[in-house]
């Protein structure tokens, strides 16, 4: 099985999000950027599949500026075989990402594309499903367990009511949820080794994909804030307060 | 302008998220129709026909739609879009699963989890786990939108008298199949529909300790939730999780017990009307957004709260 793993460079999840004073977006200048946490889980899954002899080749793809190469290097250090960097400084929406990935899939012919269920910057939760539709492939989103049996995957999905199990014929798209695995830290020898692994340099034009955004950001603002209220001393005090609010 | 709303249901009853999505559709303006896709959905179709403001109900009753898997939903919805300018679904795990497929097939960029309608082409949506709100304008001819249902009031469930029209099921092959479902069974209200929620965090220490929360929930008729830390630790199942990547809730009363208040948890509950925090760490970030904070050991405080409620006749 050949596995393709798209990875995205995002604002590190520990960094406080600051809206720019002119409301044009979120300030990304001079802040720590990292691999989208959900993508770390999909990278880990691909590497485990390779270690278990299920996958024979793993490829990481990232679409973005020069810095996106670092994200590919991280994936390579975790154990992915090689990378493809589609370089652009423009913001690329999930629809355009899915179109570029489709072109890559048609060239590489993977059996499985495994992605994070969403990126923690724009929170669209769309790329995997869009790629599945463009390819005409089945999908299993929000995976918390993946078992390969023959030419199909049996996937446990985290849904609102609990866990749903679906079986998808390969080739397929899987998007991963938080509890699929615990991503590893890359060891120093593996980080050194990753520097010698190949990364192919491409552009959206190479794939003939128009990445013009369909959504224009009118403004980005701070969410409505809540302020701290009062402290209560004991249960009687709390119950009185809640009664007077009319919520119990 | 004609808008199609995809109903959220369990083949027996319509879910409240549908009514809220109808409110968002009516805010965009125009004629609003509802698609009910499922198996043996007569009752659901009759329920949604009564929602105020709905013109027509399309009922698609087919065995392959029983679980509303994404491929089957795509095959039903995409052909219908010749007649509609926009399609809306709640941003539940069901809607999040199939809607981007519709968008890709229509060559449209989906607008995910909108929390406000500014105009027919401009919407507000949370980004960065709700740490910023983006106002976006779509240039696509057709709009594909998922709706954060906590941000909209439900459309009235009575008063409408829409006609119900049966439509054909999916025609193509399907490469995915349903195997099984393990849904949490509970007599308590659903998290997303509950008026009162009491949630436990890592401070609970174990799954067994959630028993003290259950006793308070029983007194108040509350749903039980959890932080990601409590779910990751295996105290409770994944469907308890409140937060950016779990369920987004906005009850009248939210009681956070032993929850420090990580950003991703706050994103899922900060639109609650009244927030109460019980935590022994007085510097916990949860207190900064709580209306009532109680600095105490939860193992003393929660039983004391239960006893006080008992005394007050709950």
Image (cartoon, rainbow, N blue to C red):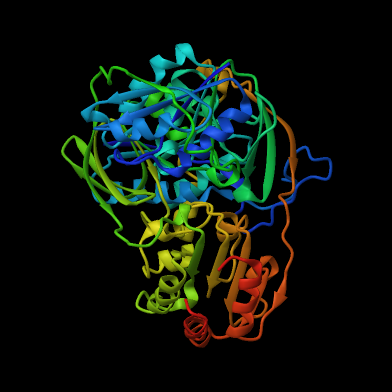
Q: Position of residue B8 (x, y in %)?
A: 40, 38
Depth check: A161 or A25 in front?
A161
Query: Which image quadrant for residue A137?
Result: top left
Q: Is residue A154 above or below residue A128?
A: below
Q: Is residue B178 above or below residue A138?
A: below
Res. A159 in view: yes
Image point (54%, 41%), residue name: B154
Depth check: B24 or A239 in front?
A239
Residue A154 as seen in the image, left or right of residue B98: left
Name of the residue lying farthest toward the left: A150
Q: Position of residue B71 (x, y in %)?
A: 32, 28
Image point (52%, 52%), residue name: B248
Q: How many marks?
A: 0
Q: Is residue A43 above or below residue B104?
A: below
Q: Position of residue B42 (x, y in %)?
A: 28, 31
Name of the residue lying farthest toward the front: B159
Q: Is residue B21 above or below residue B180?
A: above
Image point (77%, 37%), residue name: A24
Q: Position of residue A56 (x, y in %)?
A: 27, 40
Depth check: A16 or B67 in front?
B67
Depth check: B166 or A223 in front?
B166
Residue B274 as seen in the image, left or right of residue A8: right
């Amino acid at each position: 099985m050949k596995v393709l793993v798209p990875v995205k460079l995002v604002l590190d999840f520990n960094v406080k999000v600051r809206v720019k004073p002119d409301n044009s977006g979120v300030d990304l200048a001079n802040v720590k950027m990292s691999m989208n946490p959900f993508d770390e889980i999909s990278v880990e899954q691909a590497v485990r599949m390779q270690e278990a002899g299920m996958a024979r080749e793993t490829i990481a793809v990232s679409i973005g500026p020069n810095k996106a190469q670092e994200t590919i290097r991280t994936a390579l250090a975790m154990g992915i075989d090689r990378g493809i960097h589609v370089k652009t400084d423009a913001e690329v929406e999930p629809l355009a990402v899915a179109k570029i990935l489709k072109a890559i899939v048609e060239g590489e012919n993977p059996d499985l594309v495994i992605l994070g269920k969403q990126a923690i910057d724009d929170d669209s939760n769309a790329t995997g499903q869009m790629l599945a539709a463009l390819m005409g492939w089945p999908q299993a989103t929000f995976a918390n367990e993946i078992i390969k049996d023959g030419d199909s995957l049996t996937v446990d999905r985290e849904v609102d009511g609990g866990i749903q199990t679906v079986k998808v014929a390969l080739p397929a798209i899987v998007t991963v949820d938080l509890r699929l695995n615990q991503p590893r830290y890359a060891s120093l020898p593996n980080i050194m080794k990753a520097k010698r692994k190949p990364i192919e340099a491409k552009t959206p034009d190479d794939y003939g994909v128009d990445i013009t955004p369909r959504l224009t950001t009118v403004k980005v603002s701070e969410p409505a804030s809540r302020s701290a209220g009062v402290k209560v001393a004991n249960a009687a005090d709390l119950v009185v307060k809640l009664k007077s609010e009319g919520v119990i | 302008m004609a808008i199609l709303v995809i109903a959220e249901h369990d083949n027996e009853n319509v879910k409240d998220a549908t009514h809220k999505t109808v409110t968002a559709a009516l805010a965009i303006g125009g004629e609003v129709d509802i698609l009910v896709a499922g198996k043996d959905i007569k009752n659901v179709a009759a329920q949604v026909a009564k929602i105020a403001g709905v013109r027509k109900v399309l009922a698609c009753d087919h065995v392959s739609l029983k679980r509303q898997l994404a491929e089957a939903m795509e095959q039903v919805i995409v052909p219908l879009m010749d007649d509609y300018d926009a399609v809306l679904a709640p941003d539940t795990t069901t809607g999040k699963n199939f809607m981007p497929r519709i968008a890709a097939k229509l060559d449209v960029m989906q607008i995910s989890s909108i929390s406000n309608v500014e105009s027919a082409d401009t919407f507000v949506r949370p980004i960065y786990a709700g740490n910023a709100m983006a106002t976006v304008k779509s240039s696509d001819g057709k709009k594909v939108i998922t709706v954060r249902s906590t941000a909209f009031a439900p459309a009235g469930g009575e008063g409408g008298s829409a006609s119900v029209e049966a439509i054909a099921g999916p025609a193509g092959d399907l490469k995915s199949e349903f195997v099984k479902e393990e849904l949490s069974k509970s007599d308590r209200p659903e998290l997303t529909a509950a008026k009162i929620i009491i949630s436990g965090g890592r401070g609970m220490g174990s799954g067994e300790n959630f028993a003290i929360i259950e006793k308070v929930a029983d007194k108040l008729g509350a749903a039980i939730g959890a932080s990601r830390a409590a779910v990751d630790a295996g105290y409770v199942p994944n469907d308890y999780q409140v937060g950016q990547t779990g369920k987004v809730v906005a009850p009248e009363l939210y009681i956070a017990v032993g929850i420090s208040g990580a950003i991703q948890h706050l994103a899922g509950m900060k639109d609650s009307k009244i927030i109460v925090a019980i935590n022994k760490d007085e510097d916990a970030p949860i207190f900064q957004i709580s209306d009532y904070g109680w600095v105490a050991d939860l193992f003393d405080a929660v039983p004391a709260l239960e006893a006080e409620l008992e005394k007050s006749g709950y």
